[in-house]
Image (cartoon, grey):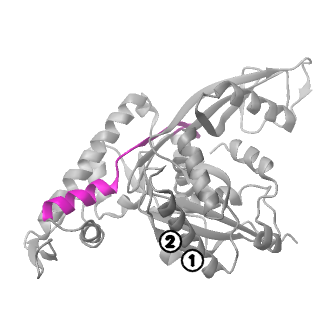
Amino acid sequence: MEKEKVIVAIDIGTSKVTTVVGEVDELGDLHIIGFGESKSKGIDKGVITNRNDAIKSIRESVNLAETTSGFKIVDAIVNIGGPHIEYQNDKEFLTFGVSQKEITHEDIESLHAKVISKASKENYEIIHALAKRYIIDDENDVLDPEGMIASKLEAEFHIILDKQTSYYNLKKVIESAGIFPAEFVANSVASATSVLYNEEKEMGVILLDIGAGTTDIAIYIEGAIEYTKSIPIGGNQITMDIAHRFKVSKEDAEALKKEHGVAIVEAVDPEETINIYPRGYEEPIEINKSLLVETIEARVLDIFDLIKKELQLTQLLGKVNAGIVITGGVANIQHLKTLAEASFGTDVRIGKPKDYRGFSEKLSFPQYATSIGMLTMLRDSTNIISSPELNRNHGFFNKIKEFMDTVRNWFY
């Protein structure tokens, strides 16, 4: 009987660092057995701004996860994102010397290596080379060509790259925190894995992961990812607007947003009041809640306008039939779905992590989509070391190359 697999993901964001430990049972179900979260310091929009602060934030999150899980964490899959992320769509092919060649795993690997070599860009690191679809003999689209007969194998790829300076600075900080980053996964890819359904991807869907510092966008058409983008705007802009308008600290502004945040002024009783604590005041003052909501609605609409401009440039909107799925911390704001549907003119769903067990009271919120998505991707990899004892003592990525090949071959 196959032993359980223990896997770890670290989500390094602008507002928080989250470490989640999962265990995959013999049936393939993902159980969350450890969780740690710390306030993010020294990290902004995927860029390291203060090395020592970033190391402390990561270490604090990992320590808490080790305490709750009982495992010593050595290796982890880690997210990567920010406006320094770029993408390319490309295709490549192999021709065989015989007409009845059986396609092998090595042939598929050679095709991937060929497109990766072609896509290499100076000063950039390739994070993913995702095969969107394979074509055999110029006519038949297949998901997995291994074992099929053909004289030509072609594939279309979605390639995600990161600037080397951002990539290596993040990698070095993680290693300095005592963790080996076995693989990096783009925010949008991880979140899509966690919250999207295959039917939505087939119909064409837009994922918006609106976090504290960035909004990560992914568009899926006919089941495959066609577009990724990260723009430097998110929930922190809402927080700062509240702080400036009401002269409160950033911490108090964030608390007001989380406790009283509503996206639509019409949804609030105009007579309802809340207390705020402006700088220089010894006692709290009372304001109409509608003033706070007015501030939130205005900034959310600004964010949506920026997103719409990006989406219009893609020329893919005519192929999107399943609407928009919004995840990330901003998705928690009440009535955001209604405001988004009015702004974008399409169906909107709030995306929450799915397909896991345990810690549901803590993790079943949009801000944990990336963390759960990374664990889901690891769960679906067949190359993870399966011994809990080996995981505990030596990490679970003894076959790093094989796992990287698995990540790069995901279709969804």
- Residue 37 tag number: 2
Report if residue 163 lies within the magenta region. Answer: no
The residue carrying pointer 1 sits among few (fewer than 14), some (14 to 19) or many (20 or more) residues within 10 Å by Cα, namely some
Q: Who's the residue at 35% across and 59% down the image?
A: 330
Q: Amino acid at mark 1?
A: Leu
Q: Position of residue 319 (x, y in %)?
A: 46, 33
Magenta part of the protein: which range? Answer: 220-246
Quarter of the figure with residue 306: top left
Q: Which residue is mark 1?
A: 64
Q: Are marks 2 and 1 in contact (CB under 8 Å)?
A: yes
Q: Position of residue 26 (x, y in %)?
A: 79, 70
| Above-or-below relation of 392 to 138 | below
Per the image, label 1 sits on a secondary structure element best described as helix
Q: Is residue 1 visible?
A: yes
Q: Who's the residue at 14% across and 71% down the image?
A: 278
Quarter of the figure with residue 285: bottom left
Per the image, label 2 sits on a secondary structure element best described as strand
| Above-or-below relation of 222 to 406 | above
Q: Is residue 159 visible?
A: no
Who comes first in sequence, dot 2 or dot 1? 2
In the image: residue 184, left or right of residue 262: right
The Cα atoms of the two marked residues, 2 and 1, are separated by 7 Å
Q: Who's the residue at 30% across and 69% down the image?
A: 258
The residue carrying pointer 2 sits among few (fewer than 14), some (14 to 19) or many (20 or more) residues within 10 Å by Cα, namely many
Q: Which of the pair 254/147 is nearer the observer?
A: 254
